[in-house]
């Protein structure tokens, strides 16, 4: 959990004007939520269950943005009951639902940003085209609804900093159009897409520099616009390491093009569990070992999950040392979009999570603790 605190310090120092609202969908493990709540972040929730989980920790409803443009009616009613007022929309039917069930909500119009290079592009499902946003705002005006701001999402795992610059420019145009209708918007939500660790294509410094430059130019502090974001993998990815046990092993005769013996290994987690990130998040998986195998010979190998489905393959082809049943392997960067979407298919349990934080990082939490949720720790 110390890495979560470190990331928060990095965020607040490099983007002081942008308030993080952690995307609960990325990883809803209570450990990370409690740490972030104590640090004073907000939370991006996409459902009643996520809102319930955050409120149960004592988080004030004002620190939640209901960032799902297409919501169930019962969930809108629940948000009203709990005073979770900030919520997104991108279509007329959503406005009609909100008018009926939460007419006093603080609405955020979600626009479709210009195309960008991202691991998971969300534009195929959400966001009104900026050129059509004015008509949607006119409908909101006709319904006497409160429009508070504009949001966008450049895509999960964005790989180009310029995507934020282009999206912020598009958002500013919507702000200007809204003013023509009599709306004085005061909230900009720049969404998610922030990397969990540096990659050859992109790093956090590139993104923060671009965002700071854009918001200072297009939304200067004197304009009075509050700026928030919805980071998920940025906080969660590096903080979690998955350890798995080798539960089965089989030797495979080499094919005609291979001279070495091949091995298939089964471990006690797979694509129906934590490794759903391979299917849903296009994750590249790297295996590491508890033992020191540096001087040992490697063999063509494959790594499989514990279920009976042939789809349950983690690494179809990899050079690995010779492992034995009972050996442990581990995988870094397993905090983002892993646990949250795991299932217990075939009756296979999800992994147990152990939380750890060094004294120095635990003490750093108190620096940010201002009227926020407290956190306790077992020795």
Image: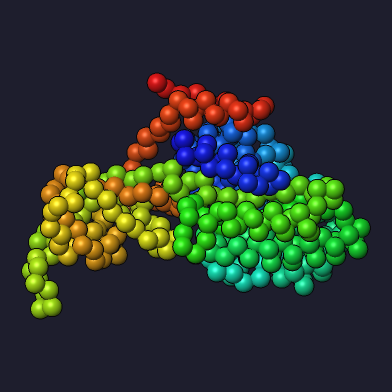
User: Image check: 105 left or right of 176?
Assistant: left
The spot of residue 333 in percent (x, y) is 40, 50
- For residue 317, above or below residue 324: below
Q: Nearer the viewer, residue 73 or 197?
A: 197
The structure residue drawn at horizontal position 37% and vertical position 34%, both measured from the top left corner, is: 354
The structure residue drawn at horizontal position 19% and vertical position 58%, both measured from the top left corner, is: 320
The structure residue drawn at horizontal position 34% and vertical position 38%, both measured from the top left corner, is: 352
| One can see residue 351 in this view | yes
The spot of residue 60 in percent (x, y) is 67, 34
The spot of residue 311 in percent (x, y) is 29, 65
The spot of residue 190 in percent (x, y) is 67, 55
Residue sitting farthest toward the bottom = 256
The structure residue drawn at horizontal position 62% and vertical position 53%, both measured from the top left corner, is: 208
Residue sitting farthest toward the top = 379
User: Image check: 360 left or right of 62?
Assistant: left
User: Image check: 178 left or right of 171?
Assistant: right
Give the quadrant of the C terminus. top left
User: Image check: 326 left or right of 362?
Assistant: left
| One can see residue 120 in this view | no
Q: How is the image coloured?
A: rainbow
Displayed quadrant of residue 258: bottom left
């Amino acid at each position: 959990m110390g890495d979560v605190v470190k990331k928060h310090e990095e965020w607040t120092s490099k983007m002081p004007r942008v308030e993080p609202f952690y995307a609960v969908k990325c990883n809803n493990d209570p450990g990370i939520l409690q740490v972030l709540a104590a640090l004073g972040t907000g939370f991006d929730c996409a459902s009643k269950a996520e809102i319930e989980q955050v409120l149960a920790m004592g988080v004030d409803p004002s620190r939640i943005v209901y960032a799902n443009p297409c919501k169930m009616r019962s969930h809108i009613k629940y948000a009203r009951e709990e005073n979770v007022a900030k919520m997104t929309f991108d279509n007329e039917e959503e406005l009609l639902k909100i008018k009926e069930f939460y007419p006093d909500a603080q609405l955020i119009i979600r626009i479709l940003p210009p195309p960008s290079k991202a691991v998971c592009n969300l534009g195929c499902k959400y966001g009104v085209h900026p050129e059509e946003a004015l008509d949607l705002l006119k409908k909101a005006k006709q319904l006497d609804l409160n429009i508070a701001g504009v949001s966008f999402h450049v895509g999960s795992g964005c790989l180009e900093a310029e995507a934020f610059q282009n999206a912020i420019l598009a958002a500013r145009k919507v702000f200007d159009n809204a003013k023509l209708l009599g709306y004085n918007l005061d909230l900009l939500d720049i969404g998610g897409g922030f990397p969990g660790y540096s990659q050859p294509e992109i790093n956090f410094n590139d993104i923060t520099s671009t965002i700071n430059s854009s918001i200072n130019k297009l939304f200067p502090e004197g304009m009075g616009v509050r700026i928030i974001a919805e980071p998920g993998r940025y906080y969660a990815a590096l903080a979690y390491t998955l350890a798995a046990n080798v539960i089965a092993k089989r030797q495979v005769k080499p094919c005609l093009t291979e001279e070495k013996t091949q091995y298939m290994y089964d471990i006690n987690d797979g694509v129906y569990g934590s490794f759903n990130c391979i299917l849903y998040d296009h994750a590249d998986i790297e295996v590491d070992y508890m033992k020191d195998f540096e001087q040992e010979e490697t063999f063509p190998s494959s790594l499989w999950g514990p279920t009976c489905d042939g789809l349950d393959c983690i690494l179809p082809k990899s050079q690995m040392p010779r492992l034995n049943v009972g050996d442990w392997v581990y995988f870094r960067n397993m905090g983002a979009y892993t646990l949250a979407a795991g299932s217990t298919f075939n009756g296979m349990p999800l992994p147990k999570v152990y939380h750890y934080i060094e004294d120095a990082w635990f003490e750093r939490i108190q620096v940010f603790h201002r009227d926020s949720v407290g956190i306790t720790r077992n020795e």
